[in-house]
Image (cartoon, rainbow, N blue to C red):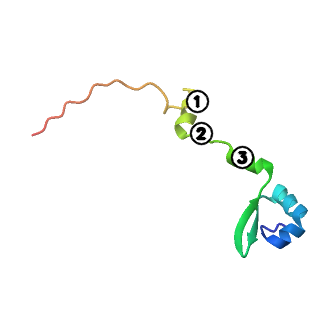
Amino acid sequence: MSVKHWQLQEAKNRFSEVVALAIKDGAQTVTKHGKPAVIIVSVEEYQRNITPRKTLFQALRECPEALSPLVGTRLRDRPRDIRFE
């Protein structure tokens, strides 16, 4: 049984089960007066969500040049001459 939404009173009465399901199946939502009030998650899921993520720029800067053609030396070509008539 993997209930994802719990009424507050039921969650209080079956707290051990709610915690076990949060660990096994993922986040469990507890509602109060029919509206979502809190979410119970495992420590592992919580840690995954609060760990700062790298920006694309940071990830590309950390790639070895052989693996990332986007991070390399910039060509120093001269601009083209354009004639306007």
Q: Left or right? Give the position of 55 relative to 8.
A: left
Q: Toward the viewer: 35 or 48? A: 35
Tally of numbered tags: 3
Cβ atoms under marks 2 and 1 closer than 8 Å: yes
Residue drawn at point x = 83 percent, y = 72 percent: 9
Name the mark on residue 48: 3
Cβ atoms under marks 2 and 3 closer than 8 Å: no
Name the mark on residue 38: none
Q: Residue 56: name its quadrant.
A: top right
Q: Secondary structure at mark 1?
A: helix
Q: Is residue 52 above or below residue 46?
A: above
Q: Is residue 40 above or below residue 85?
A: below
* Residue type of the residue flagged with mark 3: Arg
The image position of residue 53, as x and y in percent, is: 62, 42
Q: CA distance from mark 3 to mark 1?
A: 21 Å
Crowd band around label 2 with a 10 angstrom C-alpha radius: few (<14), some (14–19), many (20+): few
Q: Which residue is mark 1?
A: 62
Q: Toward the viewer: 65 or 16? A: 16
The image position of residue 4, as x and y in percent, is: 77, 67
Q: Residue 67: name its quadrant.
A: top right
Counting residues from the start of the chain, the first of labels 3 and 1 encountered is 3
Q: Secondary structure at mark 2?
A: loop
Residue drawn at point x = 54 percent, y = 26 percent: 65
**Quarter in which the C terminus is drawn:** top left
Q: CA distance from mark 2 to mark 1?
A: 10 Å
Name the mark on residue 54: 2
